Amino acid sequence: LFISFLTRSYRNYSIGCDDYLGSDKVIDKCGICGGDNTACKVVSGVFKHTLTNLGYHKIVEIPEGATKINITEMSKSNNYLALRSRSGRSIINGNWAIDRPGRYEGGGTMFTYKRPNEISSTAGESFLADGPTNEVLDVYMIHQQPNPGIHYEYIIPGDNVISPQLLAHRRPGEPLNGQLGMPESTNQEDEDLHRETDTLTGQSAGAFPVIQPGRFPSHQPENQVPAVQPPRQNREHNWKQIGKTECTTTCGKGSQYPVFHCVNRITHEEVSESYCDSSTKPIPEEEACNLFPCPAFWDIGEWSECSKTCGLGMQHRQILCRQMYANRTLTVQQYRCHHLEKPETTSTCQLKICSEWQIRTEWTSCSVPCGVGQRTRDVKCVSNLGDIVDDEECNMKLRPNDIENCDMGPCAKSWFLTEWSDRCSAECGDGVRTRSVVCMTNHVSSLPLEGCGNNRPSETTPCNNGPCAGKVEWFAGGWTQCSTECGSGSQQREVICVRKTEGNFDVLNPYECSYLEKPPSQQSCYLKPCGSKWFHTEWSTCSKSCEGGFRVREVRCLSDDMTASTQCDPQLKPEEKEPCNTQDCIPEIDENCKDKYYNCNVVVQARLCVYTYYKTACCASCTRVANRQSGFLGRR
């Protein structure tokens, strides 16, 4: 009864973070017992760097002793957050395996990994932990699409602050603020599990000792009045523990409570609770039960995305050995799961069959009749269903060529000429008319043509517009028309020394006018830009010497810089083909080939001309028949 009284007397007192009974001290944001947050330093920022390469990219370093850790993706994306220790141990989403959302131990604290998967949600992933951490941790991002921004925040103690983790690492039974903590676990397997649990929580067994009834220090504080033991009452009925509730779990540390009933002190029979004093009924205290760990099991993560969008690829998943203890699922050494078959961590995958390149047409003919040109063919990317898809669906490195060069042999060259100019260079007297001449590749292939050679056609031809009248003095004739109809050219005029007579001019030697200033006889001129003009080659030789043949020439429209143009007037285009040698073919008359007989027509009708005797005796008749037959065959 004394112990029960003491328990009820001290039940209203709490144990503070300094382990003193009745203390109201609590740990502040940066883990300092009794601190007022003034020594806390908040570190925050946003990682907004633009990343290009796929894979793991370091975002931020979480130092040792950090608390209130919050790493949050600013909007939903196909990227993933990852966490590992400085020693290289993967905590969350390591080794290209994506973990399921949940709680994961790392750096002496418990991280809550959240990944909203609702279709309507736009929130990103996050890591949350209360801390403090006992080692440096690195946060990474698995980059797969543009970075939406990662917000990070944590609290660390300021300078000259004793870390509360020192309290967590004192040995069981070591004094702390004048009170002793009690060791908790004696079972070897439980100690192993606690050891793994301690790395997860950052606290060792006994770091925060539990003051149990009857286990107080032997002395009392000097300023505390000893409790007076109430007088015992002789009652017929009293409260008695008759058992315990069932354990809340079958393994992994559950809890149960004692059950108290009102009984007769003599007969020990249960009676109604109204017979007992309700104020003396003990309050059931929680007791641990089924402390042995639950069997370990393999915790299987989600499959990663297939490494290839088509064809045979690989996908990975993370397999962890987990064990339930104290209503928490902890990661333990893999040897605890050796009694179970370990699931596969890699698997082949194929989202669809890859598309392939198909050559749909043969090569086209070469783009030029001679020289080096190009030819093409149709190449398409075709899916396994036979549909034409975008080229990106196929492997661009394996794409067949759809264009290549082709050499049709050397091209012939011909002189290309414009028509003669309409104007004579002199308004009177002798002058010239001009035309343009250029040597260019000839694409006409129906008849053989010679090369340009040295026989350049003349660019000028003489012309005369009649006699001119003169005057006694230096007489300058009118300027000739510009030597070219377009572009830069020159003009000439005749300057002579004359003596004017009535109605006539007599030409004198130039020295007669030498004392006079002689006018210039030549100047440059420019009428207009040339634009485009028709050029053509010389006519080819006639295809036949009689009975009608044809000859050809090539006609091109060229601009000022002698490049091909389409600006010429189609109605002014010179002819490219014309008939020639339309006269009948007349055999040559041989005086030695005559008919010696009057009836040679009978020889022809009897077809005796094949014999030498008759062919000589009736030479004229047989020759005419042979010419007619060859002409008939030639016209077929």
Image (tube, helix red, strand yellow):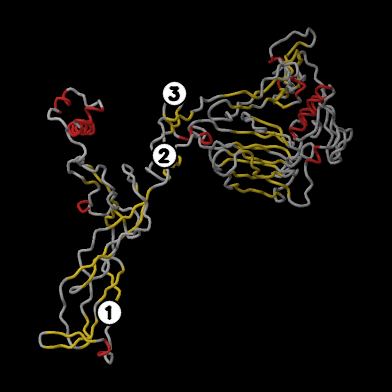
Q: Quadrant of residue 186?
A: top right
Q: Which mark is residue 375?
A: 2
**Distance (Cα) linking label 1 and label 2:** 57 Å
Q: Closer to the camera, 189 or 183?
A: 189
Q: Which mark is residue 230?
A: none
Task: From this view, report whether residue 298 is shown above or below residue 555.
Answer: above
The amino acid marked with disc number 2 is Arg
Give x and y (percent) for residue 202. Answer: 76, 35
Q: So how many labels did they put on this image? A: 3
- Asked whether residue 259 appears in the rendered view, the answer is no
Give x and y (percent) for residue 408. Answer: 41, 42
- Label 2: element kind: strand
Give x and y (percent) for residue 605. Answer: 16, 24
- Label 1: element kind: loop
The amino acid marked with disc number 1 is Ser
Mark 3, Cα crowd under 10 Å, few <14 / some 14-19 / many 20+, is few
**Distance (Cα) linking label 1 and label 3:** 83 Å
Mark 1 sits on what residue? Answer: 521
Horizontal arrangement in the rendering, residue 249 relative to residue 590 (left or right): right
